[in-house]
Amino acid sequence: MANANVYSRALMDHVSSPDYKYKMDEPTLSHEGINPSCGDDLVLDVRLGEDGTISEVSWTGHGCAVSQGSADMMSDLMVGETPENARKLCHLFGQMIRGEQKDPGALEELDEAAELESISHMPARVKCAELAWRTLDEMLAHPQGSKTATTTEDGTDENGNPVAARGQE
């Protein structure tokens, strides 16, 4: 079965003992991410070092095991990265989790987060897995800040099909 490894040991280790789940003092950047379809909600904090690289990442919030474990894996991967490369990794993760990128060589860049690839076979869990990644990407794309939280709701259903706006059906 394709999705038998969704709750891998690595994911569950990050859920049971998250290294990056804490409130950072004086982050350089902070942004909220929400997944209304599952109830996941997190605040992602990033500190940029003097050299411009990401020197610290932390998150707080609540949600399902997939969103929490994915957030912790992402945080671990991003320490030491430039904002540009971090965004590249976010896009690669998004391609993987949506089933668009399957090349093992390309996915090596994601380190243990590549183990979440099996979630691509579970459309309802994709938004859970990509919440932290979308939040970081949005934060780095707009470092001056955004007044609205990043959301996993992008006008598509869990299968990626467009949904009509309310009142336009």
Image: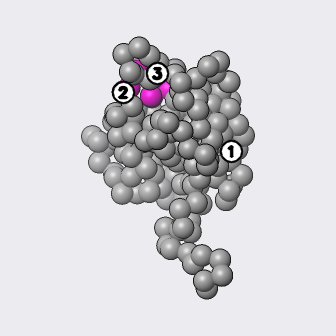
Front residue of 34/52: it is 52
Q: Position of residue 138 (x, y in %)?
A: 48, 44
Residue placed under numbered mark 1 in the picture: 41
Q: Residues within 10 Å of mark 2 (few under 14, many from 20)?
A: some
The disc at residue 82 is: 2
Start and end of the magenta stretch?
76-82
Residue 69 in the image, given as x and y percentages of width and height: 60, 37
60 horizontally vs 82: left or right: right
**Mark 2 is on which residue type?**
Thr
Place residue 52 in its image quadrant: top left
Q: In terms of image quadrants, where is residue 49? A: top left
Check contact, mark 1 vs mark 2: CB within 8 A: no
The local secondary structure at tag 2 comes to: loop
Q: Earlier in the sequence, mark 1 or mark 3?
A: 1
**Three-letter code, disc 3:** Leu
Which one is in front, 53 or 11?
53
Rendered position, 129 above or below 2: above
- Say which element carries label 3: strand
Q: Are marks 2 and 3 in contact (CB under 8 Å)?
A: no
Outermost residue, bottom side: 169
How many neighbours does mark 1 have within 10 angstroms: few (below 14), some (14-19), or many (20 or more)? Answer: many
Location of mark 3 (residue): 48
| Mark 3 neighbour density, 10 Å: few (under 14) some (14–19) many (20 or more) | some
- Examine the structure image and report whether residue 79 is included in the region drawn in magenta: yes
Q: Earlier in the sequence, mark 2 or mark 3?
A: 3
Mark 1 residue type? Asp
Q: Position of residue 19 (x, y in %)?
A: 61, 22
In the image, is residue 154 part of the stretch drawn in magenta?
no
Q: Is 165 situated above or below 147?
A: below
Q: Earlier in the sequence, mark 1 or mark 2?
A: 1
The residue positioned 39% from the left and 39% from the top of the image is 87
In this view, the mark in front (1 or 3):
3
